[in-house]
Amino acid sequence: MLNAEKLENLIHAKYPEAYVRVFDTVDSTNTRAKDTEDFSFGIICARSQTAGRGRLGRSFYSPEGTGLYMSLILPITPKEAFEFSLTAAAAVAGARAIERLCGISAGIKWINDLYINGKKVAGILTEGQPNRVIVGIGINVSTQVFPPELKQAGSLGKTADLSELAAAVALELFDMVFGKSRGFMPEYRRRSILLGKEILYLKGGTEHRAKAVDIDAMGRLVVQDALGAETALDSGEVRVIME
Ligand code: BTN
């Protein structure tokens, strides 16, 4: 069970000025963070969400007690977040925290999903406001049964302490952002589960097949078509078609 006092102590030990709030249930911690404008730095968590949101208008399944649903509020502009590759940083922060607390190595599926054994165990939804950026992170920790349409979903399969996991992810990301170091990029590439694979991606309404060959300094996925021409993708979804 996510313990508010423990989370607050862990966060405040390093960042005493951070706003820390734990709800039993909310529609979406990202929505709650966006609607609560009286602070610009902190963390909002919930033990469950009734309308957890994902990228591309999808929902994020958020049952009580078996997952971590958190939003980190950062005092930076969307432009600064983009230049920092904040979403990539959050993916690395999540992977590091999972590895440290659960002993499992998570891969990153560009842009921002964490995968273990071919299953998506975590997702990230970054949303900007004029002077703040909200990074929503959902981690399926011990959820066993998912709605049938979530064919890719899986969980860590560990009984991690949710307060410690939340604090570990948050502190990793806060340190990266306030340290202003993009030193996480090599690790982002190293954890990529796409590099070297044949993939399908959508561009201009058409599906293209290519090989994922690199993630550039801006966090874009560089793909190469059969003729060797390279394209850098900066958003969207890709699907692996060949291991
Ligand atoms: C995705 O998989 O596309 C991103 C999922 C992000 C889910 C997290 S859970 C906490 C925060 N609140 C939300 O409504 N979404 C994010």
Image (spheres, rainbow, N blue to C red):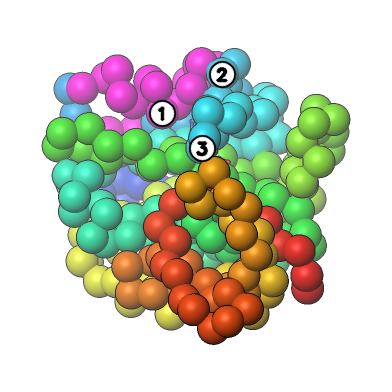
Residue named by callout 2: 51
Q: Nearer the viewer, mark 1 or mark 3?
A: 3
* Left or right side of 101 for 186: left
Residue named by callout 1: 30
Q: Are marks 2 and 1 in contact (CB under 8 Å)?
A: no
Tell me what residue is drawn at x 43 percent, y 80 percent: 186
Ligand 1 has an atom within 8 Å of the beta carbon of the residue at disc 3: yes
Disc 3 secondary structure class: helix
Mark sitting earlier along the chain (1/3): 1
- The amino acid sitting under disc 2 is Ala
- The amino acid sitting under disc 3 is Arg
Give percent across and percent down for residue 45: 46, 31
Mark sitting earlier along the chain (2/1): 1
| Magenta-colored span | 17-37
The image's mark for residue 212 is none
Q: Report crowding for label 2: few under 14, some 14 to 19, many 20 or more residues within 10 A (C-alpha).
A: some
Rendered image quadrant of residue 192: bottom right
- The amino acid sitting under disc 1 is Asn
Disc 2 secondary structure class: loop
Q: Report crowding for label 1: few under 14, some 14 to 19, many 20 or more residues within 10 A (C-alpha).
A: many
Work out how far the residue at label 2 is from the one at label 1, CA to CA, in angstroms.
10 Å
* Residue 147 appears in view: yes
139 inside magenta stretch: no
Q: Is residue 239 above or below residue 144?
A: below
**Image quadrant in which the N terminus is located:** top right
Camera-side residue: 99 or 202? Answer: 202
20 inside magenta stretch: yes
Ligand 1 has an atom within 8 Å of the beta carbon of the residue at disc 2: yes
Tell me what residue is drawn at x 56 percent, y 18 percent: 51
Q: Is residue 50 above or below residue 54?
A: above
* Residue 114 appears in view: no
Tell me what residue is drawn at x 58 percent, y 74 percent: 225
